[in-house]
Amino acid sequence: MAKATLLAMTLPAAADIQITLGSGGLKATDTEHGIQFKMGGRIMYDYVNIETEPKNGESQTITNDMELRRARIFAAGEMNDWSFKAQFNVTEKDAGKPEDLYIRYKGLGQFAVLTLGKQKEPFSLEQLESSKDITVLERAAAVEAFAFGRNVGLTLAGGWSHGYYAVGIFEDTTEDAVANKKTMNDPAITGRFTATPYKTDNALIHLGAGYSHRQGDLEVSEDVFISTSMQTYNFELGTSIGAFHAQAEYFRSIQESQIASEEDIKHDGYYAQVAYVITGEHRGYKKGAFKRIKPASKAGAWEVTYRYEGGYGKYKDFGLETANGVAHTAGVNWYANNNVKVGLNYGIAEMDATEEKGQSLRLRTQLVW
């Protein structure tokens, strides 16, 4: 009889099937036939308080509420060279909407893995880190503004001991393209390359760069748009040395104006963050992205973090607009075990042009399985 464990739990199984239950979900493995199936999910409940203060004005509370930030459930499986993942939202607002929905083929080897379906575009270190793994509770404003999230497409990816790459072609998701069923007329091309020039069991240096070319709509007057192309770049730097880890990203986008009298529209944004695990645990790393802390004792792991961000970004987490600004966020995380995390963040931000200020307090309880 095989064993399955989550704390002190055991589950019966057939003699040729292994069943485990832990931080990666419920997993059943048929080692004889090369078949694996697993189910899991995540729940994130937040208390959020956001206040804004216009220049020379009184502060105003934008949000003071409990919210279900994320609730998802997934099923995934492997059948020799083939695998799949189907992950769906189960919140009232987005119930039934897919997050990940793809088929993957690994028969060409580790240097050429093909993935077809809805998936994250290979762009931005923090965007590619799972929401359950990121250190600061919300992603940086620049990541929200420049990264592309999930889209339907085809990617080719591969990795080796000191590097990883991914490149893909994705459908155009602009409103005009979707409305006219022309999502593949001008597809987006997105790619990313990462390297770890220094890597040991307890330390590494991460370098990365990404690029995306896509079509877009540029507003030239009220309700008048013209088609234009946009190029977006990013550069990544990260490290994890013992209990210390840090990462930073710089983004730049250039949207062609297509009008002789107008200059191209250019935006720049960036962030840098550091963190230290007081209890000494080391942050994991896999396929060009950092993973969350795994406690070494039953008392859990404690982590403190700070992030500075600036330039163009979506500063909605501070109750502010999408524009140029600066923000500071400090936080503390308690990883109770491999499944549960409790985090507290406090941040302040200010817009460059309007000098409007915003502050945010966020307390999150996270359970993943």
Image (spheres, grey):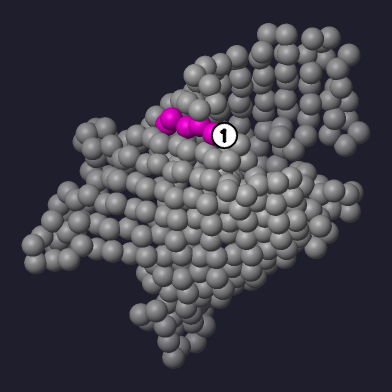
In the rendered image, the residue lying farthest to the left is 260
Q: Is residue 157 magenta?
A: yes
Q: On the rendered structure, is 133 left or right of 267?
A: right
In the displayed structure image, the side of residue 132 where residue 256 appears, left or right: left
Residue in front for this viewpoint, 349 or 244: 244
Q: Quadrant of the N terminus?
A: top right
Range drawn in magenta: 155-159
Q: Position of residue 125 (x, y in %)?
A: 52, 50
Q: Position of residue 341 (x, y in %)?
A: 74, 52
The type of residue carrying mark 1 is Trp
Residue 349 vertical placement versus 189 (above, below): below
Q: Is residue 333 magenta?
A: no
User: Residue 146 at x, y = what percent?
Assistant: 40, 55
Tell me what residue is drawn at x 26 percent, y 32 percent. Answer: 184
Say above or below: 207 vs 267. above
> Considering only vertical position in the picture, is 64 above or below 299?
below
Instruction: Give the secondary structure at mark 1.
Output: strand
Q: Is residue 84 left or right of residue 154?
A: right
Q: Quadrant of the C terminus?
A: top right
Kindly report the secondary structure that dominates the magenta region of the rendered protein: strand
Q: Is residue 129 above or below residue 109?
A: below
Front position in the image: 57 or 191 = 191
Quadrant of residue 181 in the image? top left
Residue at image location 84% in from the left, 34% down from the top: 6
User: Can you see residue 139?
Assistant: no
Q: Would you call the spot at circle 1 few (<14 residues within 10 Å), some (14-19), or many (20 or more)?
A: few
Q: Can you identify the residue that label 1 sits on?
A: 160
User: Is residue 157 something that shows in the picture?
Assistant: yes
Q: Position of residue 71 (x, y in %)?
A: 61, 43
